[in-house]
Image (cartoon, grey):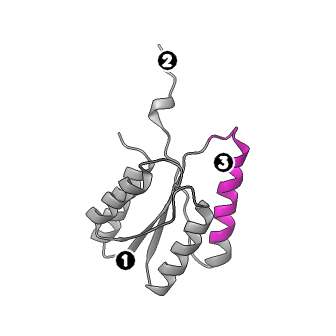
Amino acid sequence: MFGKTTSIGKIANRLKMDGKKVMVAAADTFRAAAVEQLEIWSKRANCDIIKGAENADPASVVFEAIKKAKENDVDVLICDTAGRLHNKKYLMDELDKIQRVIEKELPQSSKESLLVIDRNNRTKCN
């Protein structure tokens, strides 16, 4: 089993193997080891990583990544964001802001959102 950041690393690697130019954005600016973990995966996949300062606005990291992706003719930009809880309004608002930035900066691009469910929060049923 693996989580969001590991999934991104594996997807980035697969896309690189398929001949795509891939960049990842470290927009999970709150989990202490998230950026470092994504750096390891981006090195393994041989793709560029864009990161911001600790506790930076995640949407600003995505904005910067989009700018760099455009400058470098990147085929696929993968954005790693913090985990979400539907009952935490500020987290959902943050996700809306990130999506607005993406839509404004890349209006004609195809976009996908992947849901990775945390196994550790699963309730055990007997």
Task: Give the CA distance from mark 3 to mark 1.
Answer: 30 Å
Q: Measured along the vertical axis of the image, is residue 76 above or below residue 14?
A: below
| Numbered range of the magenta stretch | 85-102
In the image, taking residue 93 as reference, residue 10 lies left or right, namely left
Secondary structure under tag 2 reads loop
Q: Residues within 10 Å of mark 2 (few under 14, many from 20)?
A: few
From the image, state whether disc 3 or disc 1 is nearer to you: 3
Tell me the residue that label 2 is attached to. 125
Badge number at residue 124: none
Image quadrant for the N terminus? top left
Q: Residues within 10 Å of mark 3 (few under 14, many from 20)?
A: some
Looking at numbered disc 3 in the image, what kind of residue is underneath it? Answer: Leu
Q: Residue at x 37, y 77 (%)?
A: 21
Query: Does the magenta run of residues contain 33?
Result: no
Q: Outermost residue toward the front?
A: 54
- 91 or 119, which is in the foreground? 91
Tell me the residue that label 3 is attached to. 91
From the image, state whether disc 2 or disc 3 is nearer to you: 3
